[in-house]
Image (spheres, coloured by chain):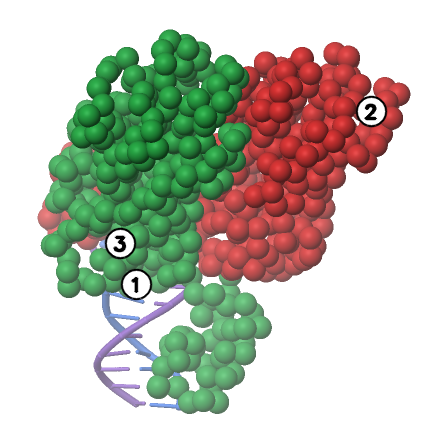
Chain colours: A red, B green, C purple, D blue
Amino acid sequence: MTTLKELAKLLNVSISTVSKALNDSADIGPETKKRVRDAAELYNYKPNKMALGLKINQTKTIGVIVPDILNHFFAKVLFGIEKAASEKSYDTIVCISHESYQNEQQSINVLTNGRVDGFIMSLATETLEKNHVNHLKTSHSIKQPIVLFDRVSEKINCDKVVIDDQQAIYNATKYLIESGRQKIAFVSDIAHLEIGGLRQEGYTKALIENGLPTNDQLILTIDQKDEAHQDIKRFLLSQDIDAVISADNTSGIMCVNIAKDLGFKVPKDIAIIGFGDEETSYLSFPQMSYINQNAEDIGREATELLIRRLENKSEKAVNYKTIKMSTSLYPKATT
Amino acid sequence: MTTLKELAKLLNVSISTVSKALNDSADIGPETKKRVRDAAELYNYKPNKMALGLKINQTKTIGVIVPDILNHFFAKVLFGIEKAASEKSYDTIVCISHESYQNEQQSINVLTNGRVDGFIMSLATETLEKNHVNHLKTSHSIKQPIVLFDRVSEKINCDKVVIDDQQAIYNATKYLIESGRQKIAFVSDIAHLEIGGLRQEGYTKALIENGLPTNDQLILTIDQKDEAHQDIKRFLLSQDIDAVISADNTSGIMCVNIAKDLGFKVPKDIAIIGFGDEETSYLSFPQMSYINQNAEDIGREATELLIRRLENKSEKAVNYKTIKMSTSLYPKATT
DNA sequence: CTGTTAGCGCTTTCAA
DNA sequence: TTGAAAGCGCTAACAG
């Protein structure tokens, strides 16, 4: 790596002259500027980020901690974050908590050492369940601002980006009711999460408001991935169901494919709506109707929120906002 | 952030004493060490990475550039990289090239400024097609070592981690032939990539070696995601096919689901094998037989290879190796 | 218009 | 056993 010092020696000027020339300071004459720039170009000079970071005490880097990168939703949020960050010339350091409290805490620990200017994160299941969030309180351990998305906690005082989980499912359920469905089932593999609860409430609320009976038999909770196929199969056969709402990214897809296999016509016999997006909807046939969380927008919004806070020191530590992103229902071939 | 300086003032000792005490130097007496450590603990001291990086000229950070994080394969490799790196206390900075040459180049540019010690990457489609790889030659632009995986280029002289693409498909095809299949189709959405070509060769080779006729009609190339469903449907109906080999992560799943919809029994009428892993195999019903690329292992191997090179300055710039990872065929319900 | 200097937080000789 | 000082690469206040 070429350094300022080397360039200075080469050009027979002082280090600060080079620095100023490169930063287009009014101090330096056009002649010198040109000479310096040409040399910098020639020797492929790039300012050392570490030195810069030390000097101006900011890293232009965002720490991102997500529970699971194999989940399409988180991958897509990450996609949005990376995109928005790089547009604003921020880098992103990614850590994966694997749903573990300890990993999450450790990632925080590793990154709160002058490596990042702020955090974007979605909480690990374990963290949420234990409800231990002291490692995240900007008041003690952490100095850097945090933006939480999707899996948030009201115990943490910071900016948040969420969707209206209850409303999203409520709308989808209502849509099914209005198209004449009577026995609507609810399938979820995130029942243990708060957002899972909210989604279920949306479902129940829609049934009640429309005079349909609620019934625990109509609710399937999936605990283990490798038993999902069997669980769903048994569930669909056990009773008359004419529609399914899935609260997560994958079980809706499985429902479509399994229902087909069992001889149901989709959507004639059973209509199905899940969470997802254009890409994932192609994994079932027929293409699944889905509630789009607009994961990429969530990532972008979180990033811009964080950067705004980072760069406006004025509104520091106050005025935290929670942004509710909108979701949209895309009726495709399964409704 | 607490600094050494602050601790020093607090304890009424010099900065270097604190530094040495914390690094367990033989210079410092046990008494002092204890006092210093307690204070450090109390004030939650963590050495500033930027300062350290500047000083010892290494960042303990790996730059990762992948074409597409929504692709399950890349997400899983990234998962493996992150895991292996964090075990060795390296951070990972992630950039996404979105299959674009320019993005890739820019990411390299941004990171080659003392931000990372080395790179792990898989090349963008555009880079591969243009065959422009000068931005990656460690001989000029880049000083940091690179490890390439999956989408590699023989024009770049560096460590590589790949699978035997041809052999993997060859084995799977042979497996189908041995179980009595005669009209085996080949479906791919990566025909434009070199690895796509290799996979197709494996398929053809297996047919020829087993005395089966090759026939271009049996090969379906998918160009556009949103036409995949229609293309596959037409393809499956256009001729007698008793098996399908998919060369990518998603088309196999689509084939299973669509074949079912068309009334074929799977695997009785049509057997199907695709690339994938345990998680993705659940997205079709019945659960798809798959060739596992062991993406997580690829990530781990690449990471360990890079770190080894980073830490053994001795074997610098020589002796580059290409590691061929093994793949495994998991026969599930679709064969 | 250009150069000197101090200092960001840290490690590491070398001197006391 | 401890401390002073230099230096990693950079910026910026100040002097010339």
Give amino acid for label 2. Answer: Leu
Query: What kind of element bears circle 3?
Result: helix
Same chain check for tags 3 and 2: no
Q: Nearer the viewer, residue A128 or B267?
A: B267
Res. B37 visible in picture? yes
Amino acid type indicated by mark 3: Leu
- Spatial distance from mark 3 to mark 1, Cα to Cα? 22 Å
Looking at the image, can residue A22 be seen? no
**What amino acid is at disc 1?**
Lys
Say the numbered circle drawn on residue B55: 1
**Element on which disc 2 rests:** helix
Asked if both marks, 2 and 1, belong to the same chain, the answer given is no
**Which of pointers 2 and 1 indicates the residue nearer the eye?**
2
Q: CA distance from mark 3 to mark 2?
A: 56 Å
Residue C14, image quadrant: bottom left
- For mark 2, name the chain: A
Closer to us: mark 3 or mark 2?
A: 2
Image quarter hosting the C terminus of chain B: top left
Crowd band around label 3 with a 10 angstrom C-alpha radius: few (<14), some (14–19), many (20+): many
Contact between marks 3 and 2 (CB within 8 A): the answer is no
In this view of the protein, which residue sits in the foreground, B202 or B51?
B202
- Residue of label 3: B306
Q: Provide the residue designation for mark 2.
A: A207
Distance between the alpha carbons at the discs numbered 2 and 1: 64 Å
* Disc 3 chain ID: B
- Which residue in the rendered view is the most extreme toward the front? B180
